[in-house]
Image (cartoon, rainbow, N blue to C red):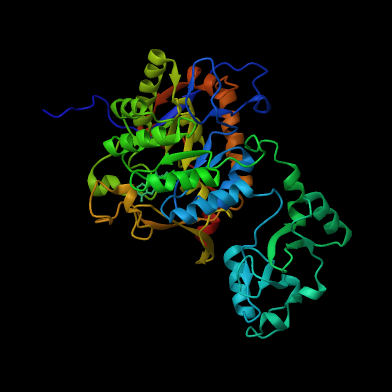
């Protein structure tokens, strides 16, 4: 007879934290969100920890090098998506490792023949008003000029005017040498010449970086940033159970600090083979997470196979249709609680602590705190990060609202067959994810700051100044369907909505 779990499967929205005693010491400013990323022995320190418990999902619509830099600046880690060529993924990792704070690679590039109409469209899509005009329209092409919104007036000029006719040409630009200019020198030039942006070029006039005046305070303010021993940003990278023999060495050579097997369902021999191959050929210094699993057995299997952290979650992601398509999965909260129990048992038995990551299904900021309270060491988020300026996708305006695109790795758009492959025919035979929009939400920094302020504040309500204290002392309660209704504003007409409906 089949096995039946005795408890129903629950999700985060069905739980609340019950406050505990908090002393006067327990204030958000005293809370530490430091958390281990990889396994460690009792009494020792993990070789990689994060300053905040957030990682960004291994997805095309979420984690590229730009996202990785932005998140590392705040203290977390991005896992660059693996559903791209080995060469491209390694190049993204290398860009993060070579990133010089304050030196930005140009991401809005145009040609002298580009029209004003195209410039306006590009600005709308990226939100960036400074564009580099290069000979071939690439980020590192020969710099011919710059266009900013001060160079044109849409009300006075034909939309067909070519960039060559209104750009500030190279001869009139203040620029600096990319090889010899430090950030301090660049900022001095910006102040001296009252510039908004200083381009840095090589000996062939090719654009290398741009330094922006607006980033000046930003560059000084990242006290939480996550850096390695050589002061480079920490970055992770996704791998699969197919081409690891080629992909892993390329990612290590590019400087990846940690890898993660990206799979929709990780309780499989493929993962064991992959972990064993990596540890045998590249040594235990190469850190590799595995998953996803949703129960004790799955955890134990990956722990024994050598995983450095273990991801939990099947079917709970916002773009995920795995449960509808295949009927597999488990409520995220229940899965997490079960896996955490197995992690703690394993620790008691072996003295090895394997961090657990709750992956997918975080809808509200407080779900992060719930996941930590239930024992997760960190969370992985896709939808959350996809809404920000730093995600790799287009920003679009539909019916007056700004949205960003967000698609699942199991959608036809991503075509990530390796994530779903069961030893089959190298293609997706049916979709497990959708292609969608999410409301645009601004910068990563602003949003992460608010989210973590809420986490710290709730931790104080629970009398916890650290994540391990929260895991140990949290009191959680399941809530009834009626209590869920009570938890939102109710029996009043919220003014905002009322006025919006009247319009
Ligand atoms: P979210 O934060 O709720 O949007 O969930 C993100 C997580 O969903 C990722 O980290 C993956 O584990 C998972 N995921 C990504 N793409 C797909 C898909 O196409 N189908 C199912 N799950 C997916």
Residue 441 rendering spot, x and y as whole percentages: 56, 52
Q: 270 and 290: which one is in front?
A: 270
Q: Which residue is depicted at the point 23% across and 54% down? A: 425
Residue 69 rendering spot, x and y as whole percentages: 60, 47
**The furthest residue to the right:** 192
Residue 369, compared with residue 324, is above or below; it is above
Q: 38 and 458: which one is in front?
A: 38
Q: 397 and 179: which one is in front?
A: 179
Q: Is residue 430 left or right of residue 387?
A: left
Residue 135 rendering spot, x and y as whole percentages: 65, 75
Q: Name the quadrant containing residue 211.
A: bottom right
Residue 109 rendering spot, x and y as whole percentages: 62, 69
Q: Which residue is depicted at the point 52% across and 65% down? A: 396
Q: Name the quadrant containing residue 411.
A: bottom left
**The furthest residue to the front:** 281
Total marks in image? 0
Q: Is residue 18 visible?
A: yes
Q: Is residue 414 left or right of residue 466?
A: left
Q: Quadrant of the N terminus?
A: top left
Q: Which residue is depicted at the point 28% across and 57% down? A: 427
Q: Is residue 387 visible?
A: no
């Amino acid at each position: 007879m089949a096995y039946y779990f005795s408890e129903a499967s629950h999700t985060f929205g069905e739980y609340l934290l019950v406050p505990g005693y908090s002393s006067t010491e327990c204030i958000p400013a005293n809370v530490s969100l430091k958390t281990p990323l990889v396994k460690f022995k009792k009494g020792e320190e993990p070789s990689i920890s994060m300053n905040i418990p957030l990682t960004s999902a291994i997805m095309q619509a979420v984690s590229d090098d730009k996202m990785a830099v932005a998140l590392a600046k705040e203290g977390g880690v991005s896992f660059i998506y693996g559903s791209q060529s080995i060469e491209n993924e390694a190049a993204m990792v290398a860009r993060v490792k070579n990133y010089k704070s304050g030196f930005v690679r140009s991401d809005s590039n145009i040609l002298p023949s580009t029209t004003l109409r195209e410039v306006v469209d590009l600005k709308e899509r990226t939100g960036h008003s400074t564009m580099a005009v290069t000979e071939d329209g690439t980020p590192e092409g020969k710099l011919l000029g710059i266009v900013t919104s001060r160079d044109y007036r849409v009300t006075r000029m034909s939309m067909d005017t070519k960039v060559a006719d209104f750009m500030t040409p190279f001869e009139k630009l203040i620029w600096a040498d990319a090889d010899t200019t430090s950030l301090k020198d660049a900022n001095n030039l910006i102040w001296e010449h009252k510039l908004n942006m200083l381009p840095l070029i090589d000996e062939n006039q090719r654009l290398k970086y741009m330094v922006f005046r607006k980033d000046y305070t930003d560059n000084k303010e990242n006290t939480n940033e996550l850096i390695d021993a050589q002061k480079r940003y920490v970055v992770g990278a996704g791998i699969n159970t197919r081409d690891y023999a080629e992909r892993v060495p390329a990612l290590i050579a590019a400087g990846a600090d940690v890898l993660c097997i990206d799979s929709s369902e990780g309780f499989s021999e493929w993962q064991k083979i992959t972990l064993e191959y990596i540890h045998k050929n590249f040594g235990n210094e190469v850190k590799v997470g595995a998953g996803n699993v949703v129960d004790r057995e799955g955890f134990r299997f990956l722990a024994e196979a050598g995983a450095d952290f273990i991801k939990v979650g099947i079917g709970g992601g916002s773009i995920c249709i795995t449960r509808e398509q295949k009927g597999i999965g488990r409520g995220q909260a229940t899965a997490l609680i079960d896996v955490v129990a197995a992690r703690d048992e394993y620790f008691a038995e072996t003295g090895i602590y394997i961090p657990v990551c709750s992956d997918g299904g975080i809808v509200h900021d407080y779900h992060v705190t719930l996941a930590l309270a239930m024992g997760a060491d960190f969370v992985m988020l896709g939808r959350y990060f996809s809404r920000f300026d730093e995600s790799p996708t287009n920003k679009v305006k539909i019916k007056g609202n700004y949205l960003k695109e967000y698609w699942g790795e199991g959608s036809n758009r991503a075509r990530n067959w390796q994530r779903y492959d069961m030893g089959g025919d190298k293609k997706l035979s049916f979709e497990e994810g959708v292609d969608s929009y999410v409301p645009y939400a601004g910068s990563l920094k602003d949003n992460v700051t608010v989210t973590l302020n809420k986490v710290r504040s709730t931790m104080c309500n629970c009398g916890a100044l650290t994540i391990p204290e929260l895991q140990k002392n949290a009191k959680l309660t399941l809530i009834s369907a009626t209590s869920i209704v009570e938890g939102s504003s109710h029996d009043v007409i919220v003014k905002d909505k009322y006025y919006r409906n009247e319009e």
